[in-house]
Amino acid sequence: MLLLKLKAKKSIRIGKLGTPSFARGYYAYVGSAKKNGYSRLNRHWLEEKKIKWHIDYLREEAKPVALYVFDQEKMGECSLAQILSESFNWVDKFGSSDCNCSSHLYYSQKSRPIRRKLEEQKGLVRVIGPRYQMERRSIMKEHPEKLKLLFERRSIRKYTEEAIPREVLQTILEAGLAAPSASDRRPWHLTVITKREELDALAEANPYGKMLKLAPAAILVSGDQTRMREGAGRDFWIQDCAAVTQNILLAIQALGLGGVWIGQHPVAERKEGAKNVLQLADNLIPFSLISFGYPAETKEARTRLEESQVAWRN
Ligand SMILES: Cc1cc2nc3c(=O)[nH]c(=O)nc-3n(C[C@H](O)[C@H](O)[C@H](O)COP(=O)(O)O)c2cc1C
C-alpha cells in the first residue's frame, strides 16, 4: 500500500485508462507482489524507472509519503481495496484491470483520514514515513551512489514470514566470504540456519536474540581453531570474522533484506547457547549470529560521524 501526495490538481495520462483529472491531495494505492514484495515496494519508491503499471504514471507526478505492507495470506489486496472503497472516492479502474474491484486507487483531500483507516487494519504495518524520505534524500545527495549501501545498512529486527530463496542465501555467503583475512588464513566457518525449531531455540538461548523468533534465516559466523595463526597473531581471527559479518550485513542490505548482528564472542554464555543448539564441532568458536529476513521495519540512512571522534593531523 503506497500513499502518494499530489501537490496540485492535474490531468495525468494513465496509459490506456485515458487522462483522468486528479485533485490535489492524497492517493492510497493498493498493490501486491507474489514474490519479492520488497523489491516491488522499492521500485514504487524510485523516481526513475520504466513505465509499466498505472501507478508508474501517477508516481511521476506524485510523491510517496508512506508505505504499508500487509500479509496477503491474511488480507488480500482486493479486500483492502474494498475497505477503502467504503470511505473514500476512487479513480475508476485504476490498477484493477485484472480483478473485479472498481479501483485500487483511493483519494482523500487530507492524509489523516486515510492513514487512520489504514492504521485501524490489523496486519498492516507502516514501513516508511516522510522522515525517512527526507533524511534519505539529504544523505544520498551528498554521497556517491556506491556508498549508499553503507549508510542504508541498519539493524533490522522485524521480518515478514517470506522465506529466502536458496540462491539468495548462496549470494550472501559468497559476498560474506569475499572479506579480507590476515595472512589470508580465512579461519572461519559459516552455519546457515533456516529450520524454524533451531531459530526458535537460538532465540531462547540468547536474551539479546529474540528477533530470531521472527527471522526466516540466520547465519552463524564461527572462528575455526584449526585454521588460526599461531602465537601473537592468533586473535586476528576476530577481525577476520568481523569483516565477514559486516560483508554479510551489507550483502543482506544490497539484496533488499534486513538483518542484525547478534554478538557471540567473547560472551561465554552466548557462545555456549549457540554451540549447544547447533551441536557445533569443538574446533568452532561462535563469533556472531546474523538474523535476517525480508524487512517489516525500515530505518533512516545515516552516518555516525562525530567530529570529537576524529582527529585530522594536517
Ligand atoms: C559486536 C556487535 C554485537 C551486537 N549484538 C547485538 C545483539 O546481541 N542484539 C541486538 O539486537 N543487536 C546487536 N548488535 C547491533 C547493535 O545494537 C547496532 O549495530 C547498533 O545499535 C547500531 O545500530 P545500527 O546497526 O542500526 O546502525 C550488535 C552489534 C555489534 C557490532
Image (cartoon, helix red, strand yellow):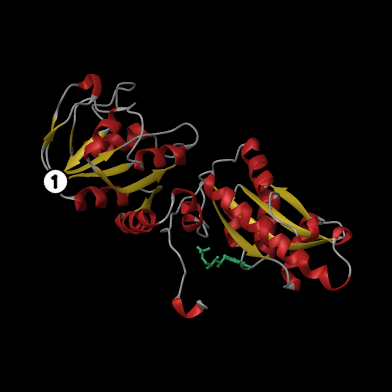
- Indicate the position of residue 202 as horizontal and vertical percent values: 69, 59
Looking at the rendering, the quadrant in which ligand 1 lies is bottom right
> In the image, what residue occupies the spot 27% across and 37% down?
59
Q: Is mark 1 within 8 Å of ligand 1?
A: no
Specify the quadrant of the image occupied by residue 143. Answer: bottom left
Q: In this view, does 203 lie to the left or right of 87?
A: right
User: Can the viewer see residue 110?
Assistant: yes
User: Can the viewer see residue 86?
Assistant: no
Nearer to us in this view, 133 or 202: 133
Residue tagged 1: 109
> In the image, what residue occupies the spot 49% across and 49% down?
146
Residue 53 vertical position relative to residue 237 in the rendered view, above or below: above
Specify the quadrant of the image occupied by residue 259. Answer: bottom right
Binning the other alpha carbons within 10 Å of mark 1 as few (below 14), some (14 to 19) or many (20 upward) gives: some
Q: What residue type is labelled 1?
A: Gln
> In the image, what residue occupies the spot 45% across and 54% down?
297
- Indicate the position of residue 207 as horizontal and vertical percent values: 63, 68
- Indicate the position of residue 256 as horizontal and vertical percent values: 50, 45
- How many numbered discs, if any? 1
Specify the quadrant of the image occupied by residue 41. Answer: top left
Residue 272 vertical position relative to residue 39 in the rendered view, above or below: below
Nearer to us in this view, 132 or 2: 132
- Indicate the position of residue 29 as horizontal and vertical percent values: 29, 37
Q: In this view, does 157 lie to the left or right of 89?
A: right
Q: Residue furthest top?
A: 16
> In the image, what residue occupies the spot 29% across and 25% down?
96
Q: Residue furthest bottom?
A: 308
Residue 102 vertical position relative to residue 238 in the rendered view, above or below: above
Query: SS for tag 1?
Result: loop
Q: Quadrant of the N terminus?
A: top left
